[in-house]
Amino acid sequence: MIDLVELVSGWIYALRITTWQQWVLRGIILLAGVVIAALCLPWVAAVIAPAWLALFALGVLSTAIVPDSFAPLLTMIPLFLAWSGGGVDAAWWRYAAVAAAVAVFHLAATYAAAAPSFARIRRPQDNQNDLIINPSRGTLEA
């Protein structure tokens, strides 16, 4: 149970130190996920649509919270199931729109994951000692 608490507290800490540029990227991730879900939902059978939507939403939310994990890849599993299940006879524009939304989703996740996970804090009177905050390790190094 402590491992789960540490995991969630790490996620909360990562969200607290997120800059506004990161929030924009994470908003793009969420928006692209909504577009993908709206375009792919007609391909999913009505019986499994709620479970598919919940699984896809969980993947999109976890990608927005922790973009440097396997979440963007795992989010594509429900998409693949929808695409192979009912997307065979769809119009060409739907394929193009889903492919564009997936590209935007993965590019935003890549840029959000590639952002630095540390910050340098300089003291005005002493430029020799930099403090480096590394939230991925949970350390404060001098």
Image (cartoon, rainbow, N blue to C red):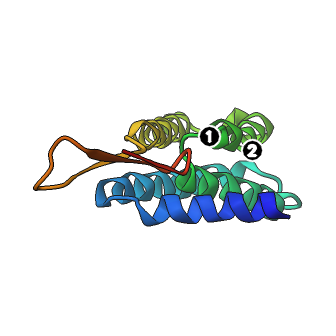
What residue lies at 64% left-to-right and 49% top-to-bottom? 40
Provide the residue designation for mark 2: 78
Residue type highlighted by circle 2 = Pro
Disc 1 secondary structure class: loop
Residue 61's tag is: none
Residue 48: % across, % down = 86, 57
Residue 141, quarter of picture: top left
The residue located at (25%, 44%) in the rendering is: 129
**Which amino acid type is marked by label 1?**
Ser
The residue carrying mark 1 is 69
Question: With 63 as the anchor, is 17 left or right in this view?
Answer: left
Q: Position of residue 95 (x, y in %)?
A: 55, 35
The quarter in which the N terminus is drawn is bottom right
Helix, strand or loop at label 2? It is helix
Residue furthest toward the left? Answer: 125
Q: Give the residue furthest to the right.
A: 47
> Residue drawn at (83%, 54%), measured in percent from left and top?
45
Earlier sequence position, callout 1 versus callout 2: 1
Q: Could you say which is closer to the camera, residue 35 or residue 6?
A: 6
Q: Where is the C terminus found, in terms of image quarters? A: top left
Graded by Cα atoms within 10 Å as few (under 14), some (14 to 19) or many (20 or more), the crowding at tag 2 reads: many
100 shown above or below 67:
above
Q: Where is residue 12, by image quadrant?
A: bottom right
Q: CA distance from mark 1 to mark 2?
A: 17 Å
Q: Is 20 situated left or right of 91 in this image?
A: left
From the top left corner, tell me how far across and down residue 120 is, in percent: 28, 47
Q: What number of labels is visible?
A: 2
**Residue 115's quadrant in the figure?**
top left
